Image (cartoon, grey):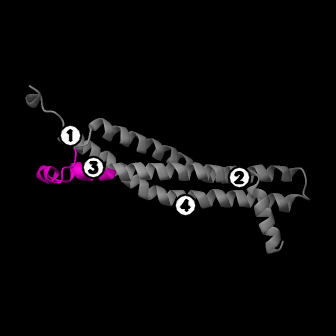
Amino acid sequence: MGTLADVLLIIWENLLGFDLLIFVFAAGALYCYILARHLSVKLHKILNHTVFLPEYVLNKTRIAPASEIDLVDSRKRANGFYAVFANLTSIFPLLGILGTVISLIPMVATIESMQENFYTALTSTFWGLIFAIIFKFLDGFLSARIEENSNNIALYLERNREKPEEAS
């Protein structure tokens, strides 16, 4: 078994190899999470003033009514970034397993490289699982906001739908 310095050196070398791909995907997932969260919080603030406040309060506070097109567009953009985030989050365990398989395949050819390949395999699996856990945790908060916004927009559109007798 290697010393701590040997293990850290192997981790560093692996970061420059396949593990870098995992970190690139993690950066993309984080970017999509931040955008989806920002858009969903912004949409929630708009909906909070249009769905949950009575009309007389809206008139007193002079909050402009939201445009249906803007609401639907904001929901679509937030949901789009969320979909990319959720898909990236779901592949981290697969990336970890892929890194393990890629590292273990050369072990068949030579037994001498077994220890080094085994460390490479473990670090890929480790990083894949770590990012899967982190982003799955974040997903729990964001998915609830996305679903709440979708329900609130449906409620807003239903309440503000032009009635056939009002149109004439």
Q: Position of residue 122 (x, y in %)?
A: 73, 61
Query: Is residue 49 one of those drawn in magenta?
Result: yes
- Residue 107 position, x and y percent, is 85, 53
Quadrant including the N terminus: bottom right
Give the spatial CA distance, label 2 vs label 4.
17 Å
Read off the residue under disc 1.
Answer: 158
In screen coordinates, is 20 left or right of 146? right
User: Mark 2, mark 4: which one is toward the viewer?
Assistant: 2
Which of the two labelled residues, at mark 2 and mark 4, occupies the earlier sequence position?
2
Q: Amino acid at mark 3?
A: Leu
Q: Nearer the viewer, residue 7 or 110?
A: 7
Under mark 2, the amino acid is Leu
Give residue 68's quadrant in the image: top left
**Residue under circle 4?**
134
| Residue where numbered disc 2 is placed | 20
Question: Which residue occupies the extreme top position in the image?
Answer: 168
State left or right for residue 30 relative to residue 160: right
Q: Residues within 10 Å of mark 1 (few under 14, many from 20)?
A: few
User: In terms of secondary structure, where does tag 3 sit?
Assistant: helix
Separation of disc 1 and disc 3 at Cα?
Answer: 13 Å
Q: Mark 2 or 1 closer to N-term?
A: 2
Q: Amino acid at mark 1?
A: Glu
Q: Which residues are magenta?
A: 44-64
